[in-house]
Each structure stands twice: as C-alpha cells, then as structure tokens.
Image (spheres, rainbow, N blue to C red):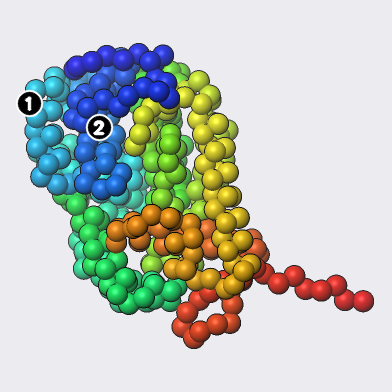
Amino acid sequence: MTTRLVYSDFTDSMLAPPLGVPIEVMPGIVWIRLALPFALNHVNIYLIDDGEGWAVLDTGLGDQETQDVWKTLLADHIDRPLTRLIVTHFHPDHIGMAGWLAAQFDLPVHMSETEYLLSRNIHLDPGALDAEHYRRFYLRHGLDAETTQRVVTQGHAYLRFVTGLPPTFERLVDGDRLTLGGRDFQVITGGGHSPEQVVLYCAAERIFFSADQVLSKISPNVSVTATIPNGNPLNDYLRSLAALGEIIPADALVLPGHGLPFHNAPSRIKELTAHHQARCDQILAACVTEPRSVAELVPLLFHRPLDPQQTSFAFSEILAHVNLMLRKGQIETADTAPGLVRYVPRAVPENRV
C-alpha cells in the first residue's frame, strides 16, 4: 500500500487525499476515495485486513470509470487477494461494483437482507422507476407535470449504475459479530438514509465504519419514497442516531462513507439531530403564513438551482420532515385544491367551558 497515516493525523483541517490513491489509515485498514459524477463527487471505500487477504467495505459506482480504477488498484496496489465484500447499503455509489467484483473473484457478499433485496429489485426491474405511481407521488405534492417528467426520467437514472448482485449472499443482522482478521466488529443496522444500513464498530480499537449514517460535514439524504408515501424515515434516522450516540465514544475514529475521517461522533450526532429539528422549524414557519405543498417548500429550504436528481432528493427529504411533523401533530393537511396536498399548522381546539 501507499501513504501511511496514523490515528492522530485526522483533524478537521486535514486535506483529502487524491482520488483512487490507497491510504493506510492505521494498520490493516486502507481508505480509498473513488470519483462520483454527481454534486457529491466521491465515495469512500475501505480495505480491511482479513487474514490471508483484504475484505472490501463498499465498492463505488457501477460505471466504466470506477471499474478502470479498480483494475489499476488490483494490478498496482492491492498486494493480497480479496476475501469478501461487505456492502453497507443499496445505493449505487456503495454497491455499484459488487456484482463485477463478486464475479471476478468469486467473493461472498455480506449485507443486510433489506438492502440486498432492494438492490436486486431495482436491478431486475429498472423500468419500475418510471412507473405511474412515481408520477402521482410527485404531482400530488405539487410538482408541475414538466418537472415531474424530468425527475422520473432523469432524477432516478443513477439507481441503474449497478453491476448486479450474485443470487446468494451472507446476511448481516443487527447485533451480529463480524470477525475480520484479528478484529471483532459489532454489526449495527439503522434506518433513515436507507432501510437497513449496516455500520461496523470495533470496541477494542475504537474504530467506527459509519457508512452514510454519520458523516462529518453533511447530513445524509433522508427521503420518503413513492413506494411508501406515508413512511416515516426521519423518525427511523433520529432513532438510529440516538442509539449510536449511546454506543460510539468520542475517541473513536469514524471512517465515513463520504468526507474525511473524524473523531467525536457523539458531538456530530447532536449536530445532525439539531439540523433536522431546524428543518422542521423552517417548515412550520413557512406553513404559518399560508398553506404549502412539498413542492412549494423546496425553494424555501433549498436556495440553489437543483438538477433532476437533486430535485428528487430535496422533494423527498422535505416530505420526510412533513411526515414526521404530521405524526407529531405539528401540522395537518389543508383543504385546498383537489388532488393537491398542502399543509398548515395543526389547529389547537379552544378550551370549552
């Protein structure tokens, strides 16, 4: 491997290493940043010492550029065979190359059941992303027909950047112990960003592979999907954060799915929780002045131009906050235009004598 960093090297001011360059962050753990063709322009993957070879944690996007980087890594940098793949969740930047790597090297794939089945479903039926229930989902919450067309035809295209999965997998369940080389990792699963995302924690060495559940500078997207339009993923996410805050100590080295490694997960978890509370406060304040649809809330909370993919993310994330607020009794639906849902603060009944 190449450059060696040590535990104390990770500070908020450190610079990101070049894309595609392996960095040994501590003995037996290698960090590699792979390029993404999105606004979030990279994903972190990791090689973890697994005795006779390297276990791979996440794989990068399933496109030709990423495959070429993998070929270079395998030819010039990876000095031992690959032993297995561990995939944290079904999003293509994390699972995209899993099918190719598994087929090339006959590797078992370890992941949670929900994430495996979601990825298989999308790969086997990509046309479903342009189905009528997706259009109704966006139109009902205020997107105009032209924007809806762009979102369902372009905004979901990234989900197709996968090389498939093998027909069998090794299931990871919350509470499992996963032994890699000489290290024991606790398997922890959490919802919100995806339904059953896997994160790994080694208590003996204070190492936390946080995937996208806890990131250093940004909040992961937490979205309602058209298949579960009344779902409450933000509640799942906040519940997961609270649980992680009780498990991960401040001195643990956090190795995330995007961004730089960092310390003090409990503090970052508090910041993420506060961020989502602030979003709910913004939505409530906007609905006080007049009834608002989800689409009408998007430009009030996201002040930059959005491409179709970002529009899909922003729309679905606002709906996640709205659904949580509905359940908490903070807002309710308003009686406005037929077929269009808008929200207002929930009326408080007057006290009766």
Q: Residue at x 14, y 47 (%)?
A: 63
Picture residue at 45% right of the left edge, 73% below the top = 141
Looking at the image, which residue is at 77% across and 73% down? 349
Q: Cα distance, mark 1 to mark 2? A: 17 Å
Q: Is residue 112 above or below residue 335?
A: above
Residue 336 lies in what quarter of the image?
Answer: bottom right
| Observer able to see residue 349 | yes
Q: Circle 2 sits on which residue?
A: 33
Q: Position of residue 180 (x, y in %)?
A: 31, 25
x and y, in percent, of residue 5 in the image: 31, 15
Label 2, residues with CA under 10 Å away: few <14, some 14-19, many ≥20? many
Given residues 246 and 234, the one toward you in this image is 234
Amino acid type, callout 1 = Ala
Disc 1 target residue: 75
Q: Earlier in the sequence, mark 1 or mark 2?
A: 2
Of the 4 image quadrants, the one containing the C terminus is: bottom right
Measuring from the top left, give residue 67's x and y in whole percent: 12, 40
* Element class at badge 2: strand
In screen coordinates, is 312 left or right of 295?
Answer: left
Q: Quadrant of residue 109?
A: top left
**Residue depth check, mark 1 versus mark 2: number of the one nearer the observer:** 2
